[in-house]
Image (cartoon, rainbow, N blue to C red):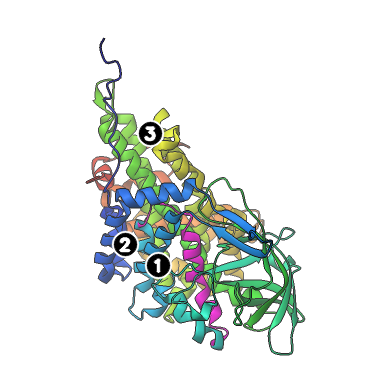
Amino acid sequence: MPDTHVVFNQAPPLLDYNPATSPVLMEALEREGGGWGADEVFALGALSGTEQAQRWGELADRNAPILHTHDRYGHRIDEIEYDPAYHELMRTAIAHGLHAAPWADDRPGAHVVRAAKNGVWTPEPGHLCPISMTYAVVPALRYNPELAEIYEPLLTSRVYDPVLRVPATKSGITAGMSMTEKQGGSDVRAGTTAAVPNADGSYTLTGHKWFTSAAMGDVFLVLAQAPSGLSCFFLPRILPDGTRNRMMIARLKDKLGNHANASSEIEYDGATAWLVGEEGRGVATIIEMVNLTRLDCALGSATSMRTGLARAMHHTQYRKAFGAYLIDAPLMRNVLADMAIEAEAATMLAMRMAGATDAAVRGDVRETMFRRIGLAAAKYWICKQATAHAAEAMECFGGNGYAEESGMPRLYREAPLMGIWEGSGNVSALDTLRAMATRPDCVEVLFDELSGPAGQDPRLAAHVAALRAQLADPATLEYRARRIAEDIALGMQGALLVAHGHPAVTEAFLATRLAGDRGGAYGTLPAGLDLAPILERAMVKGG
C-alpha cells in the first residue's frame, strides 16, 4: 500500500537564526553610540536562536507559574513556582546585562547596548518584565542614598539568585513595581494604600494592589498615601531580620498572553517599607522609572515586528503555492516589504530613544528634552502598530500560522501588551501633550531634530509644517492627542530615515506613511517602489 503521508512543501524550523543579523538594528546600535558592544549583541543573538533557548521559551510560556499561598503545614508562604526553563531564561538575561547592568557601566552607549541586547534575546518575552523592572528602579532608588548604597550593586549584579532570603545577603536581586489599584488604573494618585510612619523611620503599609508585576522579585517600589500625600516606598519581601514581610499574593492574573510572567494582586497587611524620596512626591520620584519602562515597551514592540517579519520571510522563502515560492509572488512581496518598512521605522525610532536615554542619564540637557516629548509619542505609535503587524505576519503562514506549534499565536497574544503596560494609548498620547505643557522648550528641540532632514525632502517638510500648525492650535488639543502623538512619531521616523535610512526603505516610507499613497492594510504599497533591496535587508540569512 502506498505511503500517503509524505511531507513536502513545508518550511523547515527556524533554528540558529541570529536576530543580530538585522541590518537596521546593528546600524542603529552603531549610530546611537553602542558600537563597542556589537560583539556582545551578536553573541547573545546567536544564543537566542539555538534550539535550547527556543525550547526554554516554549516551556516557560506553556507551564505557567503556580502560586502557593501556604505550605503543607498551613504556614503562609506566598511563593510562586516557575518552570525551570524560566529560571534559565532569567539567568541568561541577567548574565548578559539585560537588566540593570548599564547603571554600573560608565561607558557612553551602555544603555544603547542593553537596548540592542533586549532586541536580540527573543525566546520568550514574559521573563523580560522583571528584567525591565530591575532596570528601571535604580534611578528611583537613588532618591534614598542609604538604600541605594546597599541595593544598587545587587540590582546591577550579573548573578541570578532566585532563592528567597534577605536581599542584602544575596549575590544578586531583582525588583518589581507595585503601583496600580483597581479603582485607579493609570490614575495612580487615586490609590488608597496607606503608609503610616513608625518611630524607627520605617512605614507600615496597608492596602491592595490590582497589578503588581514580577511578584517574585526580592524588592518592590510601592506607591502609598503617607501623611503628606502619595509617596514612594522600598519594600523587601524578606525583612532584614529574616522574617517574611506582610505582603500576601491574593492571586495571579489569568492573562491573554505573557504567560511566563507572574502578574499578581497583592495585599499589604501591615507590611514594612522605607521611604524613597520625599513624602508627597511619589509620582515625581518614579517618573524616571516610568520613562525607562516605556522605553522597553517601545523596544519590545519593535522587536516583535522584526521577529514576526523574520518568521514570515523564512516561511515564504521555503513555501510554494501554484508552482512558485511565496516570496516571489508580487502581492506577497508587497505585504512583506510593507511589514519590513514598518519594522525598520519602529526599530530606528526605538533605538533613537535608547540613545536619547543614554545621553539623558549622563546629563545631556538637549537629549533630556528630546526624550521627554519623543518617548511618549514613540511609545504610543510603535506599540500601537505591533498588533496589526503580528496579525499580518501570522497570515503569511496561512492556516499553519494559526496553529500553536508555529509560535505565531504566541507572538500575536503578546503584541498588544506593550501598548497597554506603562500607560495605554490614551495615557501615552496625553503625556505627549503634558510634555509640551510642562516643558515647552522640548517642542522646539523636537522641531530642531526634524528641521534638518525636512530640508532634504518636500514630503517630510510638508508633514513637519502641518505638525507645527497642529500644535499651534489650542482648540480641541486633548481631543486630537492621538493624532498629534502619531504625527510626531511619524515625523521622527521620517527624519531618521532621511538622515540615516536605506534609500529604498526611506522612499517607500515617505511615499506611503507621509505622502499617503497607501491603503489601510499591509500589502497596499503603490507600484513603482523598489522592493528588492527592502526585502533583501529583511531576508533570513541562516536558520
Task: Please give the label number shown on residue 28.
Answer: 2
Mark 3 — residue?
396
Q: Is residue 288 left or right of residue 299?
A: right
Residues at marks 3 and 1, CA–CA distance in whole angstroms = 34 Å
> Where does residue 427 sit, x and y in percent of width and height?
61, 59
Looking at the image, which residue is at 34% across and 52% down?
53
Q: CA distance from mark 1 to mark 2?
A: 23 Å
**Looking at the figure, which quarter contains the C terminus?**
top left
What stretch of residues is rendered in magenta? 121-145
Q: Label 1, on which residue?
A: 94
Which residue is located at x 54 percent, y 59 percent?
A: 469
Q: Nearer the viewer, residue 488 or 276?
A: 276
Residue 103 visible to an observer of this rendering:
yes
> Is residue 312 depicted above or below 96 in this figure?
above
- The answer to which image quadrant residue 234 occupies is bottom right
The location of residue 224, given as percent across then percent down, is 70, 73
- Identify the element where label 2 is drawn: helix
Q: Secondary structure at mark 3?
A: loop
Report if residue 133 lies within the magenta region.
yes
Whether residue 249 is situated above or below residue 338 in the rendered picture? below
Nearest to viewer (mark 1 / mark 2): 1
Q: Residue furthest top?
A: 1
Left or right, residue 195 beside residue 500: right
Name, please, the residue furthest toward the left.
542
Residue 526 visible somewhere in the drawing: no
